[in-house]
Image: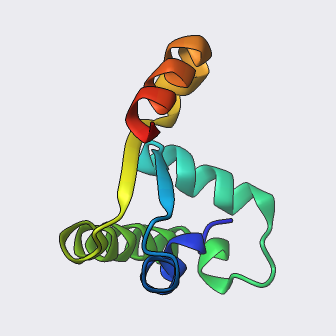
Amino acid sequence: MPENFFHLGLVGTLLPRVRVIFCRRQALDVCVSCHTQNFGSLPWACDLQDLAVYCQQYERLFAHWRAVLPLRKVEMQYEELVLNPEAAHCFLWSGLG
């Protein structure tokens, strides 16, 4: 879900040994996807300018989580996963092992 990253602080605190996969996607693709999904409960997803601001704030908060949370994590690009799922699968297992 688009707002799952808000919970990383709580997750990292409650489950210090948790493994997290950060699957990132091009910001424009995310905005178009959110805008076309009609997330009625997420008012920021209904306006393109609000989406742009939301994406900027997401990047800011994500940088904060990277700096302060000692999570075991793997970061990957969504586009790479779609183009080569087998390589992404191997990458994930080697990174989370």
Q: Residue at the spot x=29%, y=74% of the render?
A: 69
Residue 64 locus on image (x, y percent): 24, 76
The residue shown at (50%, 64%) is 18
Residue ranking furthest to the left:
67
Asked if residue 8 is positioned above or below residue 31 in the image, the reply reads below
In the foreground, 81 or 53: 81
Left or right placement of residue 45 versus residue 93 in this view: right
Q: Residue at x 56, y 23 (%)?
A: 89
Q: Is residue 20 above or below residue 76?
A: below
Quadrant into which the C terminus falls: top left
Residue nearest the observer in this picture, 59 or 27: 59
Give residue 61's position: percent from left, percent from top. Answer: 32, 77
Q: Residue 12: percent from the left, percent from the top?
A: 43, 77
The quadrant in which residue 56 appears is: bottom left
**Res 63 quadrant in image:** bottom left
Identified at 33% across, 68% down, the residue is: 62
**Left or right of 63 on screen, residue 62:** right
- Total numbered labels placed on residues in the image: 0
Q: How is the image coloured?
A: rainbow
Residue 45 position, x and y percent, is 64, 72
In the depicted structure, whether residue 21 falls above or below residue 76: below
Apparent side of residue 93 relative to residue 71 in the rendered image (left or right): right
